């Protein structure tokens, strides 16, 4: 099932460890054996779906092993300092696992909202184990149900899902927000974005001029002066809060994949999710009216009105997400021709939006 012999051996060693120490994870039943079901190779990790055979039933889990590659380090935004990449990755995985465990317990206080249950962590393999949950991925639901002219009942259902996502985010921030976190340093946003802009502006093969880079920096500096102190609150951030990481199980909203979690602005995840919905508009099968309704439902669940998108802090984070998404696309290796053409369209639309936004203000 797993072609790479070294990777196959790692998965087998992890499964053996789970079997030997099974009572630490599943106290109420006896684990008889583990059966691999399916292997997935992802950009930053390898995942094995495994069936657990207990004395009194069965259950599926996922074993995820992160790839120790430069792309993974960049994606997780790890600070190397003087440490070796393997040490930093191991530490990051342990911290994320403990945070995931804590969140899973905290969300039990809020019926209808949850996270995927983390089971075990094996830092020496850069691996985490989590429980499989029932339900359907929100991104797939939207791809299938929100296209063209959805019925009023379908729109109502989709809107309730998006409203629930906004409520989930508000709860997550309530759980993770602490006074000792301090206030957001706005200069850090500019520095974060400018690292990517400089790389693109210096690359002759990328359509991102040095003039545009300077204009974006000027825009940030101008908008920074308009931001209120109350907009600088810090909480936990998911880091990749998007429909693709939301599972809908009946009336339950379940969020997965906290590998990019950290502390940051309360606007980070809010604008990230809003931007991810905006990306649907780059496909002609989705109507602006439909996507706008879903965006309003999401913001409403979070507890804000649509006019928040005109706030300076909201705009700055939207620009950050657009530039980071653009950066990711232009730095991709050559993709299959259909994906390549679509990515070129998205890049063109991103540039148009970016130029329009900084010129309007």
Image: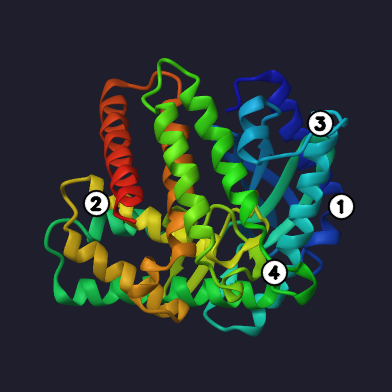
Is mark 4 in CB contact (under 8 Å) with mark 1? no
Question: Residue sitting at 40 percent across and 72 percent down?
Answer: 308
Question: Residue sitting at 27 percent across and 32 percent down?
Answer: 342
N-term-proximal mark, 3 vs 2:
3
Residue 291: % across, % down: 25, 62
Residue 69: % across, % down: 67, 26
N-term-proximal mark, 2 vs 1:
1
**Mark 3 neighbour class, 10 Å CA radius: few under 14, some 14 to 19, many 20 or more:** some
**Residue of label 2:** 281
N-term-proximal mark, 3 vs 1:
1
Is mark 3 in CB contact (under 8 Å) with mark 1? no
Give SS at disc 4.
helix
Q: Is residue 134 visible?
A: no
User: Is 129 in front, or is 200?
Assistant: 200
Asked which quadrant contains residue 157, the reply is: bottom left
Q: Which mark is residue 103?
A: 4
């Amino acid at each position: 099932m797993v072609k790479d012999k070294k990777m196959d051996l790692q998965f087998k060693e992890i499964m053996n460890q789970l079997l030997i120490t099974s009572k630490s994870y599943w106290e109420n039943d006896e684990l008889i054996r583990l059966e691999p079901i399916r292997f997935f190779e992802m950009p930053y990790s390898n995942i094995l779906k495994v069936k657990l055979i207990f004395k009194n039933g069965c259950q599926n889990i996922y074993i995820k092993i992160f790839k120790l590659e430069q792309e993974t380090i960049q994606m997780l935004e790890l600070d190397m300092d003087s440490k070796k990449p393997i040490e930093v990755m191991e530490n990051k995985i342990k911290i994320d696992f403990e945070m995931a465990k804590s969140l899973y317990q905290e969300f039990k206080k809020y019926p209808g909202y949850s996270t995927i249950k983390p089971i075990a962590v094996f830092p020496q393999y850069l691996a985490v184990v989590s429980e499989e949950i029932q339900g359907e991925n929100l991104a797939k639901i939207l791809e299938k149900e929100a296209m063209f002219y959805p019925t009023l009942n379908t729109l109502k259902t989709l809107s309730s899902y998006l409203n629930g996502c906004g409520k989930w985010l508000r709860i997550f921030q309530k759980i993770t927000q602490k006074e000792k976190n301090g206030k957001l340093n706005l200069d850090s946003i500019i520095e974060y974005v400018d690292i990517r802009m400089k790389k693109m502006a210096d690359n002759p093969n990328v359509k991102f001029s040095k003039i545009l880079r300077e204009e974006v920096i000027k825009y940030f500096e101008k908008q920074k002066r308009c931001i209120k102190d109350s907009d600088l609150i810090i909480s936990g951030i998911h880091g990749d809060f998007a429909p693709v990481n939301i599972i809908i199980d009946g009336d339950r909203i379940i969020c997965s994949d906290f590998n990019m979690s950290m502390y940051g602005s309360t606007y980070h995840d809010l604008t990230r999710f809003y931007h991810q919905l905006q990306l649907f508009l780059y496909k002609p099968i989705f109507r602006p009216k439909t996507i706008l309704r879903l965006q309003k439902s999401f913001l409403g669940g979070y507890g804000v009105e649509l006019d928040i998108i005109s706030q300076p802090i909201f705009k700055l984070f939207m620009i950050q997400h657009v530039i980071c998404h653009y950066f990711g696309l232009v730095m991709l290796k050559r993709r299959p021709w259909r994906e390549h053409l679509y990515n070129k369209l998205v890049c063109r639309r991103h540039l148009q939006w970016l130029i329009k936004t900084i010129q309007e203000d």
